[in-house]
Image (tube, rainbow, N blue to C red):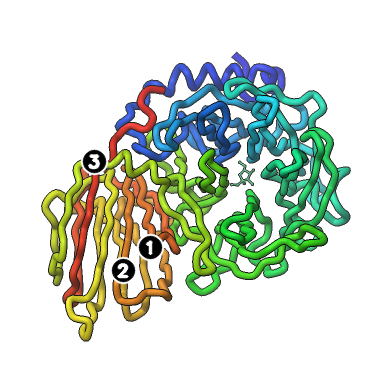
């Protein structure tokens, strides 16, 4: 049998991937997977792709290399859901089997439900382009489309639909990826694509089309003149609550206070569009997520008008943590977005409330030192906390919650009111690699009472602060047997706790 990556085998790649996942993914026990977060069906997963609603179901594709738990030539994995929590895997949708995508593969992109009933995928095809003068390999990145029925997709014979001939002067043909496509009210198409200009700074290019097949360059939608990172990957833009939002995932960031950390990060720009040029004008910026594992977010509009975000709950800088399962990579919870008080806010989709059971309440608990509460433990839980000082004139010095805990391990969320600072820490979560293990998040609008919603799902934690003004996401590699939760306060605090178990098995049989 030829190796998967042999040229001669290229034509069979889709069939081979489908056969491989069908044969082996069913051997992964549901208990080895997260409950309500979508993991790779088997092998490797990175960015969410093609997040859309088509034929009465949510479709989510993802960057996929089924054969190994590390990145390789990219396929598009595929899953569908009625409620964004219970997912069913469908066969691999795209394979790197054409001259224009047969190198590094079918990179990230997006999807649209077309008025004529077809499902359109738009993605970046990556081909090898020989050697550069310095001996390194060159890539060619072009934008391609495929059409399907929600199960099988056929690449358009006229691909690529956007190539280097449609780049503005000085734009790189090598770093030109991740199209986010949408339809305007008049039925015409637009997309934004990430790009590097010749100075090495990111720009987001906008294209327009009447039919989704013939495209023209429209404008430079945004530029990285604020100098955040180098390449901006996975752009997404939409209007929300009267504000134009631009989300990107910048590479090679430098730290900036506690807002941005170095490496691959996330950036949300809020602003408006210039009436004449259509270009984006930024007015404020923030991180999208303040945790350690979040990248490449993508949004969609649900049929009931909610703007929903999902992201890869991992980061390129932390992938060396590996995993013991035959799958690597999972998505965040889908989150409803809003813009309030000049900030992008995120909250778990309301569907999660229907998956909660076994409510446990503890009200007005006096806390000083360590405390475990009756019925409050587990690794698949939705926990709401309110923490306030016992005496307004004598604030506590530190509050902490330890979770995924046993006698050897714990993960921690710590709050220091005097510094208005939250800190997420996985130093003792069982990591066996020297990767960054903590991150701080400022809570400048803290008014004495701290509200937290904490969702644990076997291998992860997501912390929603206040009404979702800040979110921290993190992978927790600790064995599932470490399931205790302990509260701690240095000084006297009062605590309200509402805890639910989350119904298990989002991906029952696959
Ligand atoms: C972001 C990214 C994208 C690219 C894909 C490749 O994580 O680097 O820019 O399309 O992953 O898998």
1 and 2 marks in contact (CB < 8 Å): yes
Find the distance from the CA under tag 1 to the CA under tag 2: 8 Å
Q: Position of residue 188 (x, y in %)?
A: 77, 40
Residue 450: give its label: 2
Q: Earlier in the sequence, mark 1 or mark 3?
A: 3
Instruction: Answer with the quarter of the image where residue 196 lies.
Output: bottom right
Which residue: 59% across, 67% down?
A: 285
Q: Which residue is mark 1?
A: 465
Q: Quadrant of the C terminus?
A: top left
Instruction: Answer with the quarter of the image where residue 1 lies.
Output: top right
Q: Nearer the viewer, residue 195 or 495?
A: 495
Callout 2: SS: strand
> Residue 281 vs residue 48: left or right?
right
Q: Is mark 3 within 8 Å of ligand 1?
A: no
Q: Earlier in the sequence, mark 3 or mark 2?
A: 3
Q: Which residue is mark 3?
A: 357
Find the distance from the CA under tag 3 to the CA under tag 2: 24 Å
Q: Is mark 2 within 8 Å of ligand 1?
A: no
Q: Nearer the viewer, residue 9 or 499?
A: 499
């Amino acid at each position: 049998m030829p190796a998967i990556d042999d040229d001669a085998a290229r034509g069979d790649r889709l069939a081979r991937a489908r056969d491989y996942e069908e044969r082996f993914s069913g051997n992964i026990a549901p208990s080895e997977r997260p409950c309500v977060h979508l993991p790779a069906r088997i092998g490797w997963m990175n960015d969410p792709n093609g997040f859309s609603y088509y034929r009465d179901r949510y479709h989510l594709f993802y960057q996929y290399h089924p054969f190994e738990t590390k990145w390789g030539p990219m396929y598009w994995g595929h899953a569908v859901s009625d409620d964004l929590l219970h997912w069913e895997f469908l066969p691999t949708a795209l394979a790197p089997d054409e001259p224009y995508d047969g190198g590094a593969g079918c990179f990230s992109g997006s999807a649209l439900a077309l008025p004529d009933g077809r499902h359109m995928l738009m993605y970046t095809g990556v081909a090898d382009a020989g050697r550069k003068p310095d001996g390194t390999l060159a890539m060619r990145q072009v934008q391609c489309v495929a059409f399907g029925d929600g199960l099988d997709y056929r690449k358009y014979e006229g691909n690529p639909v956007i190539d280097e001939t449609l780049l503005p002067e000085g734009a790189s043909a090598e770093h030109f990826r991740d199209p986010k496509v949408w339809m305007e009210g008049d039925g015409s198409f637009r997309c934004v694509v990430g790009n590097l200009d010749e100075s090495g700074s990111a720009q987001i290019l906008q294209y327009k089309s009447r039919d989704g097949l013939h495209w023209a360059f429209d404008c430079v939608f945004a530029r990285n003149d604020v100098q955040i990172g180098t390449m901006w990957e996975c752009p997404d833009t939409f209007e929300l609550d009267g504000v134009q939002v631009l989300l990107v995932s910048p590479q090679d960031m430098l730290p900036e206070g506690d807002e941005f950390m170095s490496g691959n990060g996330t950036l949300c720009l809020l602003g408006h569009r210039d009436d004449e040029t259509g270009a984006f004008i930024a007015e404020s910026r923030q991180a999208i997520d303040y945790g350690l594992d979040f990248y490449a977010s993508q949004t969609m509009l649900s049929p009931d008008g909610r703007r929903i975000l999902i992201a890869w709950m991992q980061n390129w800088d932390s992938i060396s943590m590996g995993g013991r399962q035959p799958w690597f990579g999972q998505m965040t919870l889908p989150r409803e977005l809003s813009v309030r008080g000049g900030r992008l806010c995120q909250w778990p989709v309301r569907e999660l409330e229907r998956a909660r059971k076994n409510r446990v309440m503890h009200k007005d608990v006096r806390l000083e030192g360590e405390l475990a509460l009756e019925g409050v433990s587990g690794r698949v839980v939705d926990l709401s906390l309110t923490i306030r000082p016992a005496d307004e004139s004598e604030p506590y010095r530190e509050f902490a919650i330890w979770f995924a805990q046993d006698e050897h391990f714990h993960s921690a969320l710590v709050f220091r009111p005097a510094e208005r600072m939250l800190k997420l820490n996985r130093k003792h979560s069982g990591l066996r690699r020297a990767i960054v293990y903590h991150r701080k998040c400022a809570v400048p609008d803290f008014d004495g009472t701290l509200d937290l919603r904490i969702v644990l799902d076997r291998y992860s934690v997501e912390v929603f602060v206040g009404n979702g003004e800040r979110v921290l996401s993190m992978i927790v590699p600790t064995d599932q047997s470490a399931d205790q939760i302990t509260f701690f306060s240095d000084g006297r605090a009062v605590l309200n706790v509402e805890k639910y178990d989350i119904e298990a098995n989002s991906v029952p049989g696959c």
